[in-house]
Amino acid sequence: MTFSLAFSQGMCKPVQRATPDRRGRHRTYEADKIEEAEDAIAKDRAEAILLGCAGLGPIDKVMQSTLRVPVFDGTACAVKLLEGLHHYGATTGKMRAYLTPEQKEIAACPTSLAPIYAGGAISLAGDVTV
């Protein structure tokens, strides 16, 4: 089973259906998703469809041309959002979970790992000099 979301006037409703149709016939995956979306448009007055699975991405444009409402591939939208945040210069916060770690002392660090810690926030103790 797959999940999709139908949006209508601020409402978000999950839509779920197995691949065989209601009469037990097997149809193409695209036809099944289009029927789900048509139901959401007719019954729930959805004005946009958000596909909730990365595997549905290849059928978004086919659905959009058939349904005549915007159909969004959730994965592509997430990637574009992250690209936009990156170009905007957004970074993680520097509080709590993403706080820069305090300098720590590492005892008995193998010589082979010393270059990793060179110039970082971690100081080495013992016989290794960086």
Image (cartoon, rainbow, N blue to C red):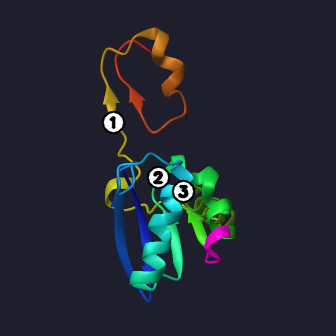
Q: Which residue is mark 3?
A: 31
Category of crowding for the residue at label 2, using alpha-carbon neighbours closer than 10 angstroms: few (below 14), some (14–19), many (at least 20):
few
* Residue 67 lies within the magenta run: yes
Give residue 7's quadrant in the image.
bottom left
Tell me the residue at 35%/46% (across/down): 102
Which tag, 3 or 2, sits closer to the chain's start? 3
Task: Tell me: 101 left or right of 80.
Answer: left
Query: Mark 1 Cα within 10 Å, few/some/many (few <14, many 20+)?
Result: few
The type of residue carrying mark 3 is Ala
The answer to which of 84 and 110 lies nearer the viewer is 84
**Labels 2 and 1: the sequence-earlier one:** 2
Residue beneath disc 1: 104
The span shown in magenta is: 66-70
Q: Is residue 107 left or right of residue 5?
A: left
Q: Is 63 located above or below residue 109 in the figure?
A: below
Q: CA distance from mark 3 to mark 2?
A: 16 Å
Residue 102 in sight in this render: yes
Residue at figure coordinates x 50%, y 67% from the top left: 50
Type of residue at label 2?
A: Cys
Q: Which residue is mark 2?
A: 53
Q: Quadrant of residue 86?
A: bottom right
- The first of marks 3 and 1 along the sequence is 3
Q: Position of residue 24 (x, y in %)?
A: 35, 49
**Image depth: mark 3 or mark 2 in front:** 3
Q: Against 44, is 86 above or below? A: above
Residue 27: x and y in percent read 49, 48
Give the class, few, some or many, for how many residues have Cα within 10 Å of label 3's Cα (few <14, many ≥20): few
